[in-house]
Image (cartoon, rainbow, N blue to C red):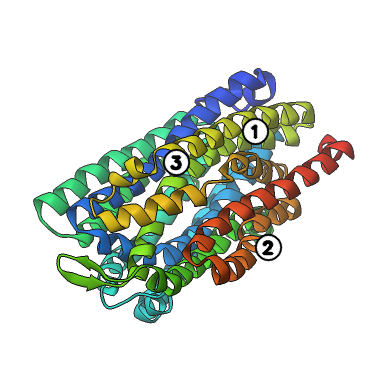
Amino acid sequence: MKSNSDTSSLALEQQSVRRLFRNYAVPATLATAANSLYNIIDRIIIGQGVGPLAISGLALTFPIMNLSIAFSSLIGSGSSSIASIRLGEHRTQEASRVLGNSLILTVIISIVATVFFLLFLDPLLLFFKASPDTLPYARDFLRIILYGIIIANLFYELNNLMRATGHPRKAMFSILLTVALNLLFALLFIFGFHWGIKGAAWATLLAQLGGLIWVMAHFLNPKTEVRFTRECLHFDWKITKEVCAIGLSPFLIHLCSCVVIMLINMQLKTYGDLDFTGILINGKPVAGGDLAIGAFGIINSIVGFMVMVIFGLANGLQPIAGYNYGAGRTDRVREVLSLAIRWASIVSVVTFALCMCFPKTITGFFTHDLNTTLITARGLRLYVSMFIFTGFQVVTSILFQSVNKAGVSILLSTTRQILFLVPCLLLLPCWLHTDGVWLSQAVSDLLAALVTGGVLAYHLRKGVLKG
């Protein structure tokens, strides 16, 4: 069958792996980087247009935002992997059924999440260590964003499926569209209308709505190979279980991230209040823990941007590995893995070098407050001191997810974010205070990379990737 895909499904088996990886990884990386970039833009505009405490309030929303993304990833990543494998098996109709079921699941999960978070918003934020100075910012932002969870989740899920089913350039454009809209609306609402942090929330919501309209138009187009039809919109337990099994790994990554961010905020509030005292902003005393949480919001934006670049490379690997694994071409799976690890490692090393050499310059884009700058610059250097191993660890985890080895992927996903990081966050601050919080991530990166290297070597030596 002739396809109108950016890169036809047949090419995934026949074209050179190097060219395929370029065709998929470049748009995927640009898309994920742009997606992360508009979070950075939000925080820069909020920091410069509203103030450092607004950044702290925004950082308090991260656990709730990550929990929402976790459920989106459960369906989006799982359905993308299964759809790629079905196309590799030349079962296009089955791929469309995966698309339909993912839509149904996303709508159900999004509605339940919206109701739950709105009912318990203030208690959750107080549990996450919101203070009287930061709670209003976090509440105002989330009350708007939560009504748009269904829009955001549908957009990201369908965008992943668009890329996985052979349309990487369209998927890239949809992300770039949301970035442009978000920047335009944020500048207008914050500096033009003076809506403060509420303006940032409305900008994000409207930008995601624009992206959703674009991807829905693609999947409703009768010329699209994998598309919405009346037949595909029937709930299927078998597809649901398969999607959830594969999507469990990225779900756990984001769920772990939610737990970790919550724990980081709690530790920074506790030890930041001890380490940073006598701070004034506009002549008013400010708790040092609030500024430490704001520093984490900045660090999370910077490092998160580079991690998303790595995930973009991994997303470029996913359809190639999934298709060829389904087609029995595991030699091509190993080749694309090697390419992805090489480029992800380059990104990791560049990130490490920039953050070590220019921490104050990078922080200065987000805030002009001297105290926040100093806290953030020191934290950034400690946080990324082992980042050089992150690219290898993330790509290898996604590889096992892509070839339907969910158990291995889950193991590798949880080592970095839970098995190593949580104990470090509980123990190191007892001796090193806020420095211990920042170093916890570095220690976890190193240990997780060692485990990942051992697991990959074992599976390659035992020939598990031979199908």
Mark 3 or 1: the one toward you:
3
Determine which residue is flagged by label 1.
Answer: 341
Q: Residues within 10 Å of mark 1 (few under 14, many from 20)?
A: many
Residue 114 in view here: yes
Discs 2, 3 touching: Cβ within 8 Å = no
Earlier sequence position, callout 2 versus callout 3: 3
Q: Amino acid at mark 3?
A: Cys
Q: Please give left or right for residue 280 compared with residue 408 in the image.
A: left
Q: Secondary structure at mark 2?
A: helix
* Residue 418 percent across, percent down from the top left: 63, 63
The answer for how far apart the CA atoms under marks 2 and 3 are is 26 Å
Could you say which quadrant of the image residue 254 lies in? bottom right
Image position of 458 with respect to 448: above or below: above
Earlier sequence position, callout 2 versus callout 1: 1
In the image, 122 versus 17, the foreground residue is 122
Label of residue 419 in the image: 2
Discs 2, 1 touching: Cβ within 8 Å = no
Mark 2 or 3: the one toward you:
3
The answer for how far apart the CA atoms under marks 3 and 1 are is 21 Å
Earlier sequence position, callout 3 versus callout 1: 1
Determine which residue is flagged by label 3.
Answer: 355
Discs 3, 1 touching: Cβ within 8 Å = no
Q: Secondary structure at mark 1?
A: helix
Q: Residues within 10 Å of mark 2 (few under 14, many from 20)?
A: some
Q: Residue at x 29, y 58 (%)?
A: 371
Could you say which quadrant of the image residue 126 lies in? bottom left
* Residue 110 percent across, percent down from the top left: 44, 64
Q: Amino acid at mark 2?
A: Leu
Image position of 249 with respect to 357: above or below: below
